[in-house]
Image (cartoon, helix red, strand yellow):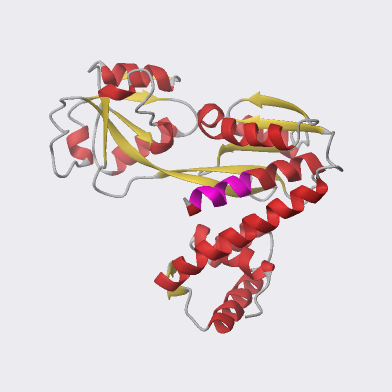
Amino acid sequence: MSFTLRQLQFFVAVAEQGTVSRAAQSLSISQSSVTEAIKELESDLGVALFERHPRGLNITHKGHQFLRHATKILAGVSDARRSFVGEATAGGRLQLGVTSLVAGYVLSDILARYRRAFPGVEVSAIEDNGDYLEHLLVGGELDVAVMVISNLRDRMALQAEIIEVSPYRLWLPLGHHLAGAEIISVHDIARDPLIMLTVDEIEENTGKLLVALGARPHVAFRTRSVEAVRSLVATGAGIALLPDLVYRPWSLEGDRIEQRDVSGSLPVVQVGMVWRRGSGLPQAARDFIGIAQSQRLMRQRS
């Protein structure tokens, strides 16, 4: 076999993004380059990695098997590279941005690993809404942001890479009448008071979903606090639709909440790293992106 690291990177991008066009956009290269790399990789391996259909690509069983190897190889290369650049990046400064939903649920783990790997880098972070962080990134006031990117506005000026995809699920208090249902529909949800989280795009996504399906919920409470939602649901004040990444059964009140899937097509929350397209990133920012990529690959293998 003679495949290259570049082919592996393109393959992983297509597997994650689901289409060649989105993969090419995330890599800032042409679609033809991605298509050619995938064809060469399939020819070299002698297997079909994807099934083609009009709306994109579905990864095959063989593709899933190879994806585990590809992510392991790329993670190993990333770790090896960092081990040799550690001396050169002992200092420096990293300007980070983060959205509210992401700060405590995604950024904390990445930042902890980064600080251990690069203790000499001075890190400063700002938490704000996605629109403002995009403005700071485009203006060069931030090096990189970790944020919800499902509805990223300025995709021409900014480059994004997904690090976590989280589906929406229903939160119910223990003993709720829907907890024992085999199938829960969005129309079932509309009969109960809804606790609405208003950070990032959560309220917008939830509202669009319910309107599209003709459900008219009674919103009993709006809050920017995930912990407030958790307490209100746990004590029976209502139910909630939230991305899976904020579910913490071991947290305060968490053991009094049940999660259930909802039938139908629910949106997902995409969390990613974002930086200004075409900009020369400082080494500290490149190292941070590398840490986040490595953590994502390790999570995929687990």
Q: Quadrant of residue 35?
A: bottom right
Q: Main secondary structure of the magenta part?
A: helix
Residue 261 x, y percent position in the rendering:
26, 42
Residue occupying the point 74% across, 34% down? 142
Span highlighted in magenta in the image: 292-300
In the displayed structure, does residue 72 sit left or right of residue 203?
right
251 or 218, which is in the foreground?
A: 251
Q: How many marks?
A: 0
Of residue 93 and residue 33, the one placed in the foreground of this image is 93
Residue 30 drawn above or below residue 266: below
Asked if residue 142 lies left or right of residue 131, the reply is: right
Relative to 226, 221 lies left or right: left
**The stretch drawn in magenta includes residue 193:** no
Q: Residue at x 51, y 64 (%)?
A: 67
Q: Let me know if residue 184 appears in the view.
A: yes
Residue 194 in view (yes/no): no
Q: Residue at x 61, y 36 (%)?
A: 110
In x, y percent, where is residue 3?
65, 76
| Quarter of the figure with the N terminus | bottom right
Q: Which residue is farthest right? A: 88
Q: Position of residue 249 (x, y in %)?
A: 34, 28
Q: Give how far across and how far down residue 222 sits, in percent.
A: 37, 19
From the viewer's side, name the closer residue of 236 and 293: 293
Q: Residue at x 25, y 15 (%)?
A: 235
Asked whether, in this view, residue 203 is left or right of residue 287, the answer is left
State the image quarter where residue 4 is shown.
bottom right
Q: Identify whether 106 is placed above or below 7.
A: above
The part of the image, by quadrant, that contains residue 114 is: top right
